[in-house]
């Protein structure tokens, strides 16, 4: 269990590091190609900071509104509150607020900018279809997302995807405006180095948004594995979460409140099947079979 947690932390760190390296490479290529990188970088930083601050303070409210989640009281769902209270004490966290989505499809997610301002959201279908140990496994998984600041990490990654898209778009536009040709002429017509830089800039301008999205999905998948391992450690009963994952993934009722903007938050992807190598690359969740296999090895 501890090896699984340590491995996923290392892989998540490496993916984020690679993401930052991609951004710096794009910024350098843009400056080399167009000669206007400083102003562009300042604007990109200001935009990224504004997006980050807005996401940090308001993303949870937006997600709850989009998901049609409503706050609930202990009197309305004492069973849910009892499980959340027990796992909160075990995790050593402030108790998150509880929200419910009135939908028969079983699923759950966590949101909030930090443990003090966190929310756990479950569907009524989850409460109806899971037994006690399965519900504890799901709540422990979501508690782990809160404790590991996964929502904040995902916000950071989304912002980095936006910065990559912005830089690559500027690079493509500079080609259309002739900036690349001007930069090449400034360095000399016979300069092989300038031609290599221009070719690399063109390739990265086209491919970097796709690479950024693939890294984002990979980070999300690693954090799901990490939350599974942390959740199993919290309950000390991996079979509970494994059984819950089987039930949720086997349920074919559509979750009407879910969409592409919020699907990555849920414990199981509510939108589509991820079987096949191509679908796995573009999925925010690892295959259920792999998650269950990892839990069964603990």
Image (spheres, rainbow, N blue to C red):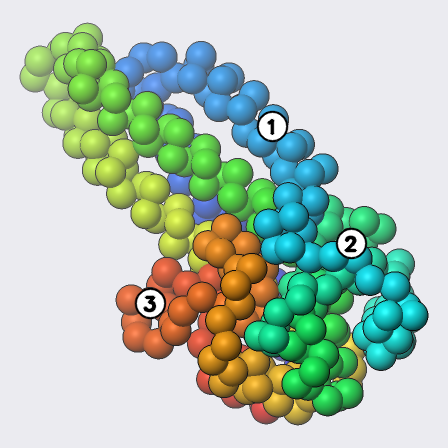
The answer to whether residue 142 is left or right of residue 12 is right
How far apart are the two marked residues, 2 and 3, measured between alpha carbons? 31 Å
Instruction: Say whether residue 291 is left or right of residue 86.
Output: left
Is 2 located above or below residue 151 in the figure? below
Tell me the distance, in whole angstroms, between the alpha carbons under discs 1 and 3: 32 Å
Give the residue displayed 37% in from the left and 68% down from the top: 280
User: Which residue is labeled 1 in the image?
Assistant: 49
Q: Residue 288, image x and y in percent?
A: 49, 80
Mark closest to the chain's N terminus, 2 or 3: 2
Mark carried by residue 118: 2
Q: Quadrant of residue 88?
A: bottom right
- Secondary element type, mark 1: helix
Residue 227 - label: none
Going from N to C along the chain, the mark reached first, 1 or 2, is 1
**Who is closer to the viewer here, 290 or 28?**
290
Residue 10 appears anywhere in the view: no
Residue 113 horizontal/vertical position (percent): 73, 46
Residue at 60%, 28% in the rendered image:
49
Residue 279 image label: 3
């Amino acid at each position: 269990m501890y090896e699984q947690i340590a491995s996923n932390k290392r892989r998540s760190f490496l993916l984020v590091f690679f993401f930052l390296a991609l951004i710096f490479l794009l910024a350098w290529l843009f400056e080399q190609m167009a000669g206007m990188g400083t102003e562009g970088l300042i604007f990109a930083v200001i935009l990224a900071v504004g997006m980050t601050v807005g996401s940090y303070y308001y993303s949870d409210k937006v997600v709850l509104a989009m998901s049609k989640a409503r706050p609930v009281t202990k009197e309305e769902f004492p069973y849910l509150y009892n499980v959340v209270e027990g796992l909160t004490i075990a995790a050593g966290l402030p108790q998150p607020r509880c929200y419910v989505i009135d939908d028969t499809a079983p699923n759950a997610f966590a949101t909030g900018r930090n443990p003090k301002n966190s929310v756990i959201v479950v569907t009524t279908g989850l409460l109806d279809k899971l037994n006690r140990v399965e519900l504890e496994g799901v709540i422990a998984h979501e508690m782990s997302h809160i404790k590991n600041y996964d929502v904040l990490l995902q916000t950071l990654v989304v912002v980095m995807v936006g910065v990559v898209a912005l830089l690559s778009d500027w690079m493509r536009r500079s080609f259309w405006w002739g900036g690349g040709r001007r930069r090449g002429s400034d360095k000399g017509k016979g300069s092989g180095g300038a031609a290599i830089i221009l070719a690399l800039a063109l390739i990265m301008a086209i491919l970097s948004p796709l690479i950024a999205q693939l890294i984002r999905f990979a980070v999300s998948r690693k954090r799901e594995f990490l939350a599974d391992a942390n959740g199993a450690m919290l309950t000390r009963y991996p079979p509970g979460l494994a059984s819950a994952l089987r039930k949720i993934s086997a349920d074919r009722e559509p979750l009407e409140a879910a969409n592409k903007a919020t699907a990555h938050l849920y414990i199981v992807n509510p939108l589509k099947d991820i079987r096949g190598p191509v679908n796995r690359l573009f999925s925010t969740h690892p295959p259920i079979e792999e998650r269950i296999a990892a839990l069964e090895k603990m």
